[in-house]
Amino acid sequence: MKGFTSYLVARLGTSLVTLFGVAVAVFLLVRLLPGDPARVIAGLLATPDEVERIRHQLGFDRPETVQFAIFLGHLAVGDLGVSARTSEPVARELASRLPYTIELALAATVVGSLAGILAGVASATRRRTFWDYVLSLGSLGGISMPVYWSGVLLMIVFAVDLRWFPAAGASQPTSIVLPGVTLAFFSMAFVTRMTRASMLDVLRQDFVRTAYAKGLDGRRVVFRHALQNAFIPIVTVIGLQFGNLLGGAVLTETVFAWPGLGQLLVQSIEARDYPMVQGIILVYATMVIVVNFAVDMLYAYIDPRVRYT
Amino acid sequence: MRDVWKRFRQSGPAVVGLVILAALALMGASAPLLSHYDPTAQDLSSAFIRPNAAHPFGTDFLGRDILTRIVYGARYSLVIGLLAVLFGAVVGVPLGLVSGYFGGWVDLVLQRVTDVLLSFPNILLALALVAILGVGLQNVIFSVGVSTIPVFIRVSRGSVLTVRELTYVQAARAAGATSLRILGRHVLPNVLAPIVVQATLSIGFTILAAAGLGFLGLGVQPPTPEWGSMLGESRTYVFSAPYTMTFPGLAIFLAVLAFNLVGDGLRDALDPFLAD
């Protein structure tokens, strides 16, 4: 376990450096605004006094280094500033939206991963058969499918025609079904492809042939012996997929009016509410960094070889 | 090269992808010949006509022929996808080559920057940039292009690491070639295969992302017949006229699928070549 601890510390260091880099990027983002940022944030109708007030409130009248130090200081205590649109604290608004995004992303990841692993195993064990072609083409179709279109199609069929589930919002327990399935399908496609490739790799190896030669039941060989050894690339892809999924969730949330961070992001961009945009981007990046760190730790724990690379 | 083409040709799905792409490109190029309707002219008296002989895909809320708009839209989606990837590769590949070839602190800094960029996955980086730069064709190409940079850095860096210590590179170094010459003349041609595969697959992503921005109203702006913004504009009428959303979405799906089929086919065709 000594190797594990030092790996954990080193990996944690990298994550913190990345997080710092993200903070710098988010800080610089608003300063990339063409022209005078205070003017842009205040809006076209603002009087010169108001522009000055905003310039002072956002600290644009101080040296950049001081601004950055203040920005970091505020971040450290969870202060993300106030919304330019509602004048409410950004952090409070994000806290009320975040659970919806996490709920959607988690549901899609769990359902998509399980379905994807099963489909990938089925595809790999039936290589070059009808079902393999169907699943392979289906998963390629899945990664090529715009979620903002598949979501609409599901909505037309299951909410408009059949009336099984609500078309929009999050007011009922079944509201999550349609956005969840839309995103899960997207995630499943990636996991299926990775599971198939990884399983094909493992199924070729000697220990699998040995297990079959011993006369073990085929299902046992596939799930106990092969799948366990194919797991690391699959877990990696599920981890990477999580970030990708958050991007897809922005579009899915907009389609289904799901009150998460993605919907808020789009509204805030339209309203030029830059403090809110900064806060949301920061929260997304933090989630991605945390999940990647967790995945790395998980497989360093599963596979000791990882710790020494 | 001939072997690659031969193997590529033998893969059914890859050829289907190539045929779809050729058809879409041809469609965009000869748009005015294919339809006598104007893609942007409004005629409210013929709004929301269901698909029929005169309008095979129907008309939208402003009475514009949807098939015509999709035909013209091929120009936008394909060009945006290609230019964005070109931009990402032109910036990302040299950075990746330098990072992998020199190693040391250059590599360290570039890899941390890549980590930061990868913390804004999928459409998020493009959204953040569009939020600042504003909407419109050029900003969409730039924003989506920037979000493909990190993957080009990673792929080209990884490939350089595998050839850096090979004999022919060491021979060039021993012969006194400059680093620039080694990278350009000896390393790049030998790591091109995975970069080309990545570029093809990335075009699929850039088309999806650019159309996604259009769907959100943050991409190419109406009345331009861009597939994503056609979807976005029709959202309000999804219940009364679902066909206005069916066909633009199908066009995006086909274009992305075609690039993914070709990318997969290229990878399989190039793989044995790499293993030689």
Image (tube, rainbow, N blue to C red):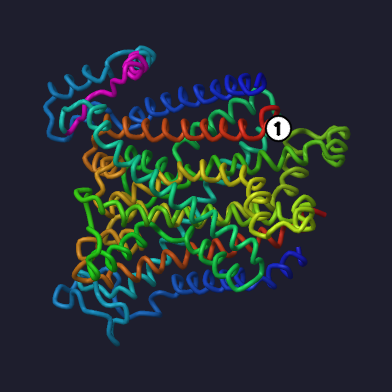
Residue corresponding to mark 1: A305
Tell me the element at label 1: helix
Residue lying at 38% horizontally and 57% vertically, measured from the top left = A147
Q: In the rendered view, does A202 fall on the left or right side of B72?
A: right
Residue B155 location, quadrant: top right
The vertical placement of B186 against B107, above or below, is below
Please provide the residue range marked out in magenta: A70-85
Q: Is residue B122 in view?
A: yes
Residue B76 location, quadrant: bottom left
The vertical placement of A62 against B86, above or below, is above
Q: Chain of mark 1?
A: A
Image quarter of the N terminus of chain A: top right
Was residue B173 drawn as part of the magenta stretch in this picture?
A: no
Residue B112 position, x and y percent, is 55, 28
A138 or B212, nearer to the observer: A138
Residue lying at 72% horizontally and 42% vertically, measured from the top left = B184
A120 or B13, nearer to the observer: A120
A176 or A45, nearer to the observer: A176
Residue A137 position, x and y percent, is 54, 67
* Count of numbered circles in the view: 1
Was residue A77 drawn as part of the magenta stretch in this picture?
A: yes
Residue A189 position, x and y percent, is 50, 57
Q: In the rendered view, does B66 fall on the left or right side of B272?
A: left
The vertical placement of A299 against A210, above or below, is above
The vertical placement of A119 against B92, above or below, is below
Residue lying at 70% horizontally and 30% vertically, measured from the top left = A309
Q: In the rendered view, does B68 fall on the left or right side of A189?
A: left
Q: Is residue A40 in view?
A: no
Residue lying at 30% horizontally and 71% vertically, measured from the top left = B39
Please name the amino acid that badge 1 sits on. Arg
CA neighbours of label 1 inside 10 A, class few (<14), some (14 to 19), many (20+): few
Residue A85 location, quadrant: top left
